[in-house]
Image (spheres, rainbow, N blue to C red):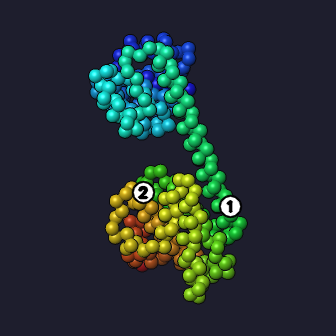
Amino acid sequence: MQILFVDDDPNVLATYERNLRKQFQIETATSGEEGLGLIEQSGPFAVIVSDLRMPGMDGFEFLTRAKERAPDSVLIMFTGYADLQTALNAVNEGVYFRFIIKPCPTETLVKALETGIAQYEMIVAKRELLEKTLKGSIEVLTEILGMVSPAAFGRATRVKHYVKDIASELKLANTWRLEVAAMLSQIGCVTVPPQVLDKAYAGQALTEAEQDVLSSHPSVGSMLVANIPRLEAIAGMIEGQQLPFKSYAVQPSEAQEREIALGAQMLKVAVDLDQRVASGLAPSAALAELRRQPDEYNPEIVDALYRAKGMTASLLAE
C-alpha cells in the first residue's frame, strides 16, 4: 500500500522516509501542487498525509483537492497546538479521517498509518462489492428483458446508442447513469403482453385498454429498479420518460433532480424517435417531427441528436 507525505520541509520528509521505509511504501512531495501531481501519476495512495501550514496551497486546500481526485484515500493532517481547534472543526465536519499533533512519536505515526490503511482497505472492498452487485443486477435485468421481449430489448439497445450520441454532443461527463437508464428504459415491458408490444412497435392503433397497459411500463420499470443500490436516480429517469418537456417548466434546484429530469427528457426523445423510425419514417423526417413539438421534446436534445447523426438544419425543416 502506498502512502503519500506532503510537507514543504525536505528535512521532515527525509525523516519520514528514514523512519518508515521498512514498513511502508512512501512517496513524498514538497508542495500541494506536487502532491496532486503524484496522485494523478502514481496513485492510488491508501493514505495521504499533509502538513497544515505550507506556503501557497495549505494543507486544508491540498487535502480537499486530493479528496476530489482520490475519494477512497484516507486523509491525515499534521498540525501544531496553535491550530488544534481549526483541525478539530474540520474533523467534526467529516472533512478528514483524523489529525496528528506535532511533534509525533514514530510509534504513534505508525499506528495511525496502519489504521488508515485498514480503513482504506475497507472502503475499497465495500465499493468493489457494491459495484459487482450493481453490475450483476443490471446484467440480470437486461438478460430478463432480452429473454421475455426481444423486441423491447432491441429498442432499449437502440435507445442507448441515441442517448450516448446525445451525451457526447452535449459534452456530458460521467454518463453511466444515462446509459444504464437507456438500457433499462423498457424493462417494464416484461409485464406488457407480447401482442400489444408488437402492435405498438409496428405503429398500429391500440385499444384504450392496450394503451393503458403500455403506458404503465415506465412506472413498472421504475419500481423494478428503485430498490437496487445506486440506481435511485435511474429509476426516476425511467419513471419520467413519457413526460412532455413543458412539464419541466420550472428547473429543479437539486443537482440529482436536474440529472433525473435531463435523463428522462433524453429517453423521451430517443424512444419516440425510435418509434417513428420503426414505423417507417426516415430518421431526418422523424427528427423533424420532434423538432416541431418544442413543448413535447427538449429542443436542445433534439438538436444534439441531429448533429450527432450528421443531419443539416434544412433536412429537419422539412
Q: Residue at x 46, y 36 (%)?
A: 70
Image position of 90 (left or right of 39): left
What x and y, as percent, mark residue 115?
52, 27
According to the picture, the residue beneath numbered tag 1 turns out to be 143
In the rendered structure, which amino acid carries the disc numbered 2? Gln
Q: Nearer the viewer, residue 168 or 152?
A: 152
Q: Nearer the viewer, residue 216 or 175?
A: 216
Q: Secondary structure at mark 2?
A: helix
Q: Residue at x 54, y 20 (%)?
A: 24
What x and y, as percent, mark residue 34?
39, 26
Q: Is residue 315 visible?
A: no
Q: Residue at x 37, y 57 (%)?
A: 254
Q: Quadrant of the N terminus?
A: top right
Q: Residues within 10 Å of mark 2 (few under 14, many from 20)?
A: few
Quadrant of the rendered image containing residue 94: top left
Q: Quadrant of the C terminus?
A: bottom left
Q: Is residue 256 above or below residue 193?
A: above
Quadrant of the rendered image containing residue 193: bottom right
According to the picture, the residue beneath numbered tag 2 turns out to be 256
| Residue ranking furthest to the right | 147
Depth check, mark 1 against mark 2: the one in front is: 2
In the rendered structure, which amino acid carries the disc numbered 1? Glu
What x and y, as percent, mark residue 136?
65, 52
